[in-house]
Amino acid sequence: MDVEPIKTTVEELLKVLATENVIGETIETEDKLLIPVTKFGMAFGAGSGEGKGPGDQGAGQGSGAGGGAGIQPIAMIVVFKGVKGPEGVRVMHLTPPNPIGRAISEAVPAVIDLMKESKETVKEFTSEENKEETA
């Protein structure tokens, strides 16, 4: 089996699937960093065969390979310089969100609020424990 077509096809697909094509080049402005995010799909196939014609006439063999890939931008991550924590990061969707994506996007602010409340509760609890121990 001739592996050269397969090898060439895989090498070309690997060029398309390079990290910089999936997570794009960072764009830096005065007050923020923009990081493009894409999704990609890939298909690949290869085959070979050999045989003879009817009555053992003419022998032949052949091989081939093919593949394809596609990349689609789906989001832009925006990191605000000088803003610490989750408040300094936003994800801007470039495609309409599916139901799961929409639910996650709506849940994130609530989770951040819960984390802040938990942090404050822990501070209050440890402060009260310290007061009781000293009394």
Image (spheres, rainbow, N blue to C red):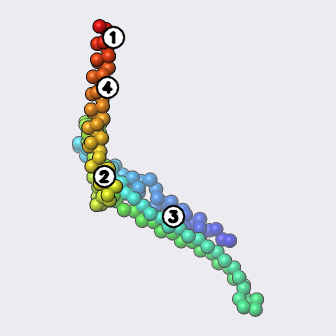
Circle 2 sits on which residue? 103
Q: Which of marks 2 and 3 is in front?
A: 2
Task: Residue type at mark 4: give it.
Answer: Val
As drawn, 15 above or below 124: below
Locate residue 103, reporting x and y percent: 30, 52
Residue topped by disc 4: 122
Q: Mark 1 belongs to which amino acid? A: Glu
Count of picture labels: 4
Residue 133: assigned label: 1
Residue kind at label 2, given as amino acid type: Ala
Quarter containing the C terminus: top left
User: Residue 12, which numbered label?
Assistant: 3
Quarter that holds the N terminus? bottom right
Mark 2 surroundings: few (<14), some (14-19) or many (≥20) residues within 10 A: few
Between circles 4 and 3, the one closer to the viewer is 4
Q: Which of marks 2 and 1 is in front?
A: 1
Decide which of 20, 127 is in the foreground and name it: 127
Q: Which of marks 2 and 4 is nearer the N terminus?
A: 2
Tell me the CA gap for discs 1 and 3: 68 Å
Marks 4/1: CA–CA distance: 16 Å
Q: What residue type is labelled 3?
A: Glu
48 shown above or below 128: below
